[in-house]
Image (tube, coloured by chain):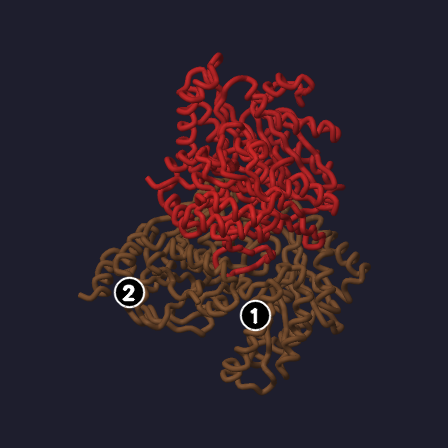
Chain colours: A red, B brown
Amino acid sequence: MSVNDEFLVAAQSLLGPRGLTRDADLITPWLTDWRGRFHGAAIAMASPADTNELAGLMQLCSHHRVPVVPQGGNSGMSGGATPDGSGTALLLSLRRMNAIRSVDVAPREAVCEAGVVLQTLHDAAAAQGLRFPLTLGGKGSATVGGLIATNAGGTQVLRHGSMRAQVLGLEAVLADGRVFDALTPLKKDNRGFDLKQLMIGSEGTLGIVTAATLRLQPALADRVVLWAGIDSIRDARKLLLHVQNLAEDILEGFEVLPEHSLDAVLALLPAARAPLNGRHRWHALIELAADNAGAAALPGRAEELLTSAFEAGLLEDATIAANEAQAEAFWTIRDEISPAERALGPAMQHDISVPVAAMADFVTEAVAAVEARYEGTTAIAFGHLGDGNVHFHVLAPKGADRAPWEASQGKEISSFVHDLVTQWGGSISAEHGIGQLKRDELGRLGHPVQLDMMRAVKAALDPLGLLNPGKLVPPCG
Amino acid sequence: MSVNDEFLVAAQSLLGPRGLTRDADLITPWLTDWRGRFHGAAIAMASPADTNELAGLMQLCSHHRVPVVPQGGNSGMSGGATPDGSGTALLLSLRRMNAIRSVDVAPREAVCEAGVVLQTLHDAAAAQGLRFPLTLGGKGSATVGGLIATNAGGTQVLRHGSMRAQVLGLEAVLADGRVFDALTPLKKDNRGFDLKQLMIGSEGTLGIVTAATLRLQPALADRVVLWAGIDSIRDARKLLLHVQNLAEDILEGFEVLPEHSLDAVLALLPAARAPLNGRHRWHALIELAADNAGAAALPGRAEELLTSAFEAGLLEDATIAANEAQAEAFWTIRDEISPAERALGPAMQHDISVPVAAMADFVTEAVAAVEARYEGTTAIAFGHLGDGNVHFHVLAPKGADRAPWEASQGKEISSFVHDLVTQWGGSISAEHGIGQLKRDELGRLGHPVQLDMMRAVKAALDPLGLLNPGKLVPPCG
């Protein structure tokens, strides 16, 4: 038998028929990433039932030197869960490990296995009068393990932080099959390096997240959604500071979009209506929300906030959603920007961040710089102003053919944008991660000392290089 | 010249007369730890003026294989900043690097060098109408670098988190003199491992913190301090949950103490008065606080909270401090527990945590177990109930001689307490760190996988073992 055959026999024996398959019909759907940009191959797909099985499997992988590509809901944006084309790697699905072990009301904690789908967690928390305050487009497929491995973000980071801030405890299987058990949540623990922080956001390159203890929040009792028309993104920043000064305790979201994006959504969705009558160069979508303790005061505080912002000259016009249906309609506009902009033609999309205080200036300068340098392009920025994180899209000149434009000018534009972001002290990946999509850019633009530290830590915890090879960590030189 | 002489000549040339001294009068005060339990020796004391000088110094240390013991205010509790007795290490003071580079009001951030004293930071933030929400007994000497290296805690962790939660950006010098620069604060950044998390709480064993960008909070406009008499620590836990349900947004502190500790403070401080008239087995000190936006509602909410807690049968008696002087007097009782208990005779002190939900049960069981097993001892627990962190003191039987008791029965008791904590899934160091004091206990009780991971990361980032040798990381087997 070849080494691979020996491994497969042993893995089959360990995992049983449900735990290992080589059936192409079952595997193929998981070998292409969410956006359809990366395709890979695998010797088999493993679906262990629990942490012990996975630990045994990793011992086998380690013994036979079989690389492993962990995968949750396969809804990542950077190809981090897609194997390369060599077919040497084992595709490791965590989806069978999907138990919510507990939801505890008093400490407000949930213990979830890696394969729990985000929407399922939302529902389980809601059933106990609680909520898990992180959500994103892929909530119907994204899993807890993947959210942790990628330190997922979303629109609620402003108030609650990204996935890292929700993780109170963590369990992971290491490259050699040993189990890192830090699942018990301790609010204070100074027994050395906080190793679970290393696992969070490591995209499966240091260990495979198998379970986590997650922080829950009280359920929201009420929300108020506002829409404001604003003259400039600098004014939007001032408005954000105004809201933070007066109502930070109830500020659940603060998103901005330019006129261009609103028009694009209105063109895409015939049923959508502009929230305001006049035209404004910028728009802000603001959500205020409170639990039971603060719900009664919420409408009054929202009114006061708008009045004071008007008086301070921070906005041109504004409206408060009259009911939940209108609130949803406002959010639909925000959520449909990406597809609406894509419908206009080819575009390069960049998930970037700079220091929050610099974001307004950065957007103003970057839009002008890109449009001046690349004639006919349109640059737009929208998203999480309060987090210093915008999605920066550059639309191709009218009439450009998608594939050739993306491969030539589009690629050059992305490098240009990433250079700019780096000059501003920002990040070329604010929330989508590095995966295989941005590994070379990270190698090109990352701080050499930090890249060396990452390589050193990677070599220390995965000396055989079996965990998600080719992802995240740029190779030397 | 010997290797050491060569090193000293080069270091003197690099740092100048202010930057390096071998004068015993200047060095000796820094060779004994805060509590006077550890004494060390050093070949010299270096005090670099800036990050570049320190980087050059570490290149020299690396070249000459000179170990380095970083030190901030020397107010640590675990001997983490005291060299061993060999005299081979360089004592590295960060106290000259004490500039507050900026305090920015809009993003509420301060950029501080490592040597900035906590009280100085408090004052600088207050001057801008802001505050830095972490404080502790040693605030007049503890430095930002030391607070980060030890992930310091205090009484405000309940609301604001420990030092880790305050660090938005970080700069550190590595063992080989390279500079890890992650000082620019990005609210969202998914470019791989969050390496600054590794530095926080690593006690100078992975790198030397030189500067940090810290999160500030709005200044408090008002506070209400309550004192409650309670029948049991389980009721105290129920009261905590009650307060969290109704007033989590203004809950600044929740400390508990047993009758024994109150009596000890009243005995130590003749001017102190019991906040309540009757006797109660347990007491809770609760601070509610709000910034400008919430100050007006504060007194009313405090009254409501007490009324509802009475009605729910959660407390026996309670009082609200009538003025700021009385509020301070309540806090003085809390702050003087440690000296008051020490004045009663020899005691073993343990800085421990267990999951918050388990704390009341743990204390009840642990007190009974210790007192049953060690005749004549008195076990008491007080502190941060809301963090699952109590200071667990075991007083010697009456008449015991301090030194022999501590060395024999005292030591055995500490092992017993640490065993119990470990069985409950807790930590043998909640906030004071490991240093040299608890390194062997960590080696004895730490999870073998986690200890191996720590050793692997340590070897990866400090392959020559020059950074704070003998601290934190237990040696193999």
Is residue B377 something that shows in the picture?
Answer: yes
Residue A32 horizontal side relative to residue B274, left or right: left
Residue A99 on image: x %, y %: 66, 47
Quarter of the image for residue B4 reads bottom left
Residue B409 on image: x %, y %: 55, 81
Chain that bears disc 2: B
Q: Is residue A8 above or below residue B82?
A: above
* Element assignment for label 1: helix
Task: Give the position of the N terminus of chain A as an image quadrant.
Answer: top left
Residue A379 horizontal side relative to residue A15, left or right: left
Residue B162 on image: x %, y %: 55, 55
Q: Residue at x 40, y 28 (%)?
A: A415
Is residue A160 something that shows in the picture?
Answer: no
Q: Earlier in the sequence, mark 1 or mark 2?
A: 2
Chain that bears disc 1: B
Residue A419 horizontal side relative to residue B313, left or right: left
The type of residue carrying mark 2 is Thr
Q: Residue at x 46, y 52 (%)?
A: B198
> How many numbered marks appear?
2
Q: Which mark is residue B21?
A: 2
Farthest residue in the bottom direction? Answer: B399
Farthest residue in the top direction? Answer: A399
Instruction: Decide which of B250, A73 is in the foreground and name it.
Output: A73
Q: Residue at x 63, y 46 (%)?
A: B292
Q: Residue at x 48, y 12 (%)?
A: A399
The type of residue carrying mark 1 is His
Nearer to us of marks 1 and 2 is: 1
Residue marked by disc 1: B418
* Element assignment for label 2: strand
